[in-house]
Image (cartoon, rainbow, N blue to C red):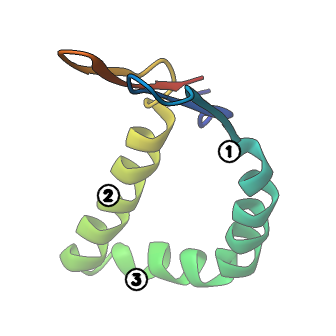
Amino acid sequence: MTIPPAVLRLRVVEPGRKKVNLWLPIFILWPIALFLLIVSLPLIIVLIAVALFNDQVKKALGKLRAAMTLACSLRGLQVDVCEKDKEVRIYVY
């Protein structure tokens, strides 16, 4: 089972300015997402039942699953952008 990222770290360095190092706790959003999932569960069940007969609903559910897989696979992502003396780094844990 894969789980979505828990923390996002953003670091910005510019000469002559103070370094910015932000730790953004993404795990705080997990209870909200769980609540939304529980509330929308009856709709999802109906969509799955309809998907047995409708190809468009199957495609929509497949895209929903792909979006969740993409969000979970962001864990471990590192983006480093460096230009002369400026630097921006993003880490997803």
Q: CA distance from mark 2 to mark 1?
A: 25 Å
Instruction: Count numbered badges in the picture.
Output: 3
| Left or right of residue 10: residue 22 | right
For numbered disc 3, what is the local secondary structure?
Answer: helix
Residue occupying the point 62% across, 27% down:
1
Residue occupying the point 32% across, 57% down:
62
Residue occupying the point 26% across, 16% down:
85
Residue occupying the point 25% across, 80% down:
54
- Vertical order, 68 against 87 (above or below): below
Pointer 3 or 1: first along the chain: 1
| Left or right of residue 60: residue 21 | right
**Three-letter residue code for mark 2:** Gly
Residue 61: assigned label? none
Residue hosting label 2: 62
Disc nearest the viewer among 2 and 3: 2
For numbered disc 2, what is the local secondary structure?
Answer: helix
Query: Would you identify the image quadrant in which residue 31 lies?
Result: bottom right
**Three-letter residue code for mark 1:** Ile
**Three-letter residue code for mark 3:** Val
Disc nearest the viewer among 2 and 1: 1
| Left or right of residue 11: residue 88 | left
Query: Would you identify the image quadrant in which residue 39 lies?
Result: bottom right
For numbered disc 1, what is the local secondary structure?
Answer: helix
Q: Front-most of 32 and 2?
A: 32
Pointer 2 or 1: first along the chain: 1
Residue hosting label 3: 50
